[in-house]
Amino acid sequence: VEYRSITRPIREINKKARYLEAAATDIDPKTNTISCISIVCEGNSCETGEFEVNYDRLLFAVGAQTTTFGTPGVEEYCNYLKQVGDAQLIKNAIVNCFEQAGLPDISDEKKEKELTFAIVGAGPT
């Protein structure tokens, strides 16, 4: 899978909308203002910035952070799929499994283990 096959910048979906990547730190419904903080990184250097955004209508969407819902084993064995880099890690892990399974001295039991995948996701439901 190529990078361009799995991602599409949200800004291309609706050119009339204004998209900002930041964390909301406060919402003032009386003045229709959201206080935000952004983090911009270049290489190993990151800077934060604070700003306010005025709004006419506010859409609040939850689920921006990955959670394990307390499921045992998730932290140790899970590959998250939130960022493009996560997809690349999963792709590399799967390729490595196929490489291991293709070795001439591998047992059938080990081969079956290397080629068995469980895919779980889409939240707690």
Image: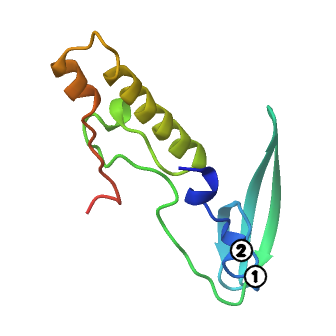
User: For the view shown, which residue lies furthest in the top direction?
Assistant: 105
Q: Secondary structure at mark 2?
A: helix
* Residue 72 shown left or right of residue 40 in the figure: left
**Going by the picture, which residue comes out furthest to the front?**
104
Q: Amino acid at mark 1?
A: Lys
For label 1, count other residues whose C-alpha is less than 10 Å away and answer few (under 14), some (14-19) or many (20+): few
Pointer 2: residues within 10 angstroms few (<14), some, or many (20+)? Answer: few
Q: How many marks?
A: 2
Camera-side residue of 104 and 71 = 104
Q: Residue at x 66, y 64 (%)?
A: 24
Horizontal and vertical percent for residue 1?
53, 50
According to the image, label 2 marks what residue? 12
Seen in the image, is 118 located left or right of residue 25? left
Indicate the secondary structure of the residue bearing disc 1: loop
Quarter where residue 110 is shown: top left
Three-letter amino acid code at disc 2?
Glu
The picture quadrant where one finds residue 37 is bottom right
Q: Residue at x 51, y 45 (%)?
A: 87
> What is the spatial separation of the Cα atoms under label 1 and label 2, in whole angstroms?
6 Å
Instruction: Choose between 21 and 25: the one closer to the eye.
Output: 21
Q: Which residue is mark 1?
A: 15
As drawn, 95 above or below 65:
above
17 up-or-down from 91: above or below: below
**Left or right side of 106 for 54:** right
**Going 35% across and 60% down the picture, which residue do you hit?**
122
Q: Is residue 14 above or below residue 37?
A: below
